[in-house]
Amino acid sequence: MRRDSAAQSALLRLRHLIASEFAPGDRLPPEKELAETLEVSRTTVREALVVLAAEDIVTRQWGAGTFVSAPSKVASLNMSTVESYRDRVGAGGRVVTLLEASCDLVPPPAPAAAALQLEAGAKAWHVRRLFAVDGAPSALMSEIVPAQLFGRPIDPNPMLRIDTSLYELLNRHSPGAAMHASTELEAVCVHGDDARALDLADGAPVLRATQTTFARRGEPVAHGVSLQRTDLVRMRITR
């Protein structure tokens, strides 16, 4: 197993261990004991604890140990890896659901067509999804995916279910199709139908993320814009 895959696996197992066997305020076992339980090195455990501390899942007190943090009122959206919104927010113990989803074959907006290097007149799939965190509308996502990807038609309909993310869809179609993403963030005001979908007042502030996803060799394979409520989900970039 590759080093990065082993580290991610250990991190996921440690998340599950904390969620299933410990309560807020509990002190975690020493790193050596956790390493033996997870069958990984102490270095891997230490790296995983650093990530969990950055996400406020645990609190590290030098000389006293590592303790399970009380649940935050605001969910954390960790941007350090290429993962789905469902997995990023759900990793913190929140319940992520899909409230609405639609899929249409349309002429793509000009910014998406340029980002995806599509020919004039080409159509693309427009997938629009509204996510909720703990029952409250939290993120409105609009994804543009080429109708043809690597010479084969792509079916985006699995994305209309919560169990299939954009990254999973792309990698099922062609292994390695979603290797990394470039995201631009800006604070904007939301209006009209978008505001109503997110259960916000007209003109309320949200975080807009414009993202292009790239394949292994740098080919652009998807372009999307998401509007996210910052009162429900706080974005976290760990470096």
Image (cartoon, grey):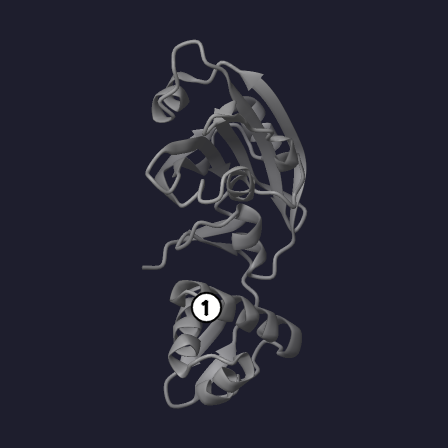
Q: Depth check: give the residue in front, 83 or 168.
A: 168
Q: Which quadrant: the C terminus?
A: bottom left
Going 66% across and 40% down the picture, which residue do you hit? 98
Compared across the picture, whether 140 is left or right of 41 comes to right
> Which residue is denoted by mark 1 in the rendering?
6
Q: Which quadrant: the N terminus?
A: bottom left
Disc 1 residue type (three-letter)? Ala
Which x, y percent locates residue 148? Answer: 50, 24
Going 47% across and 79% down the picture, which residue do you hit? 40
Which x, y percent locates residue 110? Answer: 39, 17
Q: Residues within 10 Å of mark 1 (few under 14, many from 20)?
A: few
Please determine whether, in this image, residue 172 is positioned above or below residue 57. Answer: above
Which x, y percent locates residue 104? Answer: 60, 20
Please determine whether, in this image, residue 32 is positioned above or below residue 187. Answer: below
How many numbered discs, if any? 1
Q: Depth check: give the residue in front, 31 or 120.
A: 120
Which x, y percent locates residue 112? Answer: 40, 23
Going 66% across and 73% down the picture, which residue do you hit? 20
The local secondary structure at tag 1 comes to helix
Q: Residue furthest top?
A: 121
Q: Residue furthest front?
A: 151
Q: Is residue 147 visible?
A: yes
Q: Is residue 199 visible?
A: no
Q: Within the image, what quadrant is residue 12 found in?
A: bottom right
